[in-house]
Image (cartoon, helix red, strand yellow):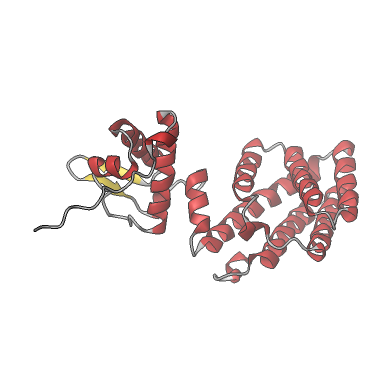
Amino acid sequence: MTDSPGPPASPLFPPGQRKRPANLARSVTAELVERIVRGVHPPGSVLPPEPVLVEDFGVSRTVIREAVKLLQEKGLVRVRQGSGTVVTSPTTWDMLDDLVLGAAITEADGVVVLDDLVVTRRVLEADMANVAARVAGPETLEQLGALVDEMDELVGDQEAYGRHDRSFHDTIMLASGNRIARAVVRSLESQVASTARYVGRPERALCVASNKGHRRIYERIAAHDPQGAAEAMFTHITEAWLVRRGGPGDPARLQR
């Protein structure tokens, strides 16, 4: 007597939880992005064929095709006629994409990804501080000075301090007039703002040290010292991250 087959595997998205196809496609895409970034489907491998993915996720072929299309747009796969959907090298992945960046940060080497994010941010913000020191008018200087003074009083209130911190940096970016650089920084920051690994420990002493860096930046901008403002911003972002980062990796890569 042969054993009877076990019950079929439950689909990842049961019918009762389904919404619109577009939402399903994004959910499937998010799961596949995580699998690819984790190495479940390593570079050069072929994704399971469409019928297998349909059964795995419990969705239609249309949803799977839309998800594969989204993966292509993010640079994670390419479709080869007759060869299937092939996972690409990480060098082609869109690291500004929220799903890709989020999955990369949660991996074991996520601190390395955050190192790269910080390096990118400080290059852009240092340049914007340089420009702000040349063009900032009285209104901008007054706003920056007020923010620094207020942050001195808010070092014990993490939430309020964080809001003022972001406003300080954004005021400088706005003053620079570089809309593209500001958009890149704001996009990166929005994707890691709630990541404990990036935010670090909520300690009063760290806020005190952080605001000393803000004050140095403000003083150099107020003195219309472009080089000094750029260096102060570069140092502030680097030192703040080195204090927070911990974990594996080589912090020396953050130095000049």
**Is residue 128 left or right of 46 when viewed as pictured?**
right
Which residue is painted at 11% across and 57% down in the image? 2
Closest to the observer, 246 or 131: 246
Quadrant of res 254: bottom right
Q: Taking 240 as reference, is 89 left or right? A: left
Residue 16 position in % (x across, y down): 41, 34
Query: What quarter of the picture does the C terminus occupy?
Result: bottom right
State the residue lying farthest toward the top: 20
Q: Report which quarter residue 90 is drawn in.
A: bottom left
* Residue 143 position in % (x across, y down): 87, 41
User: Which quarter of the rendering shows the N terminus?
Assistant: bottom left
Q: Position of residue 140 (x, y in %)?
A: 85, 39
x 38%, y 39%: residue: 14
Query: Quadrant of residue 215 in the image?
Result: bottom right
The spot of residue 180 in percent (x, y) is: 62, 38
Q: Is residue 4 above or below residue 146?
A: below
Would residue 155 be found to the left or right of residue 126 on screen?
right
Q: Nearer the viewer, residue 215 or 34?
A: 34
Residue 92 seen in this snapshot: yes
- Number of marks in the rendered image: 0
**Is 189 left or right of 72, judged from the image as shown?**
right
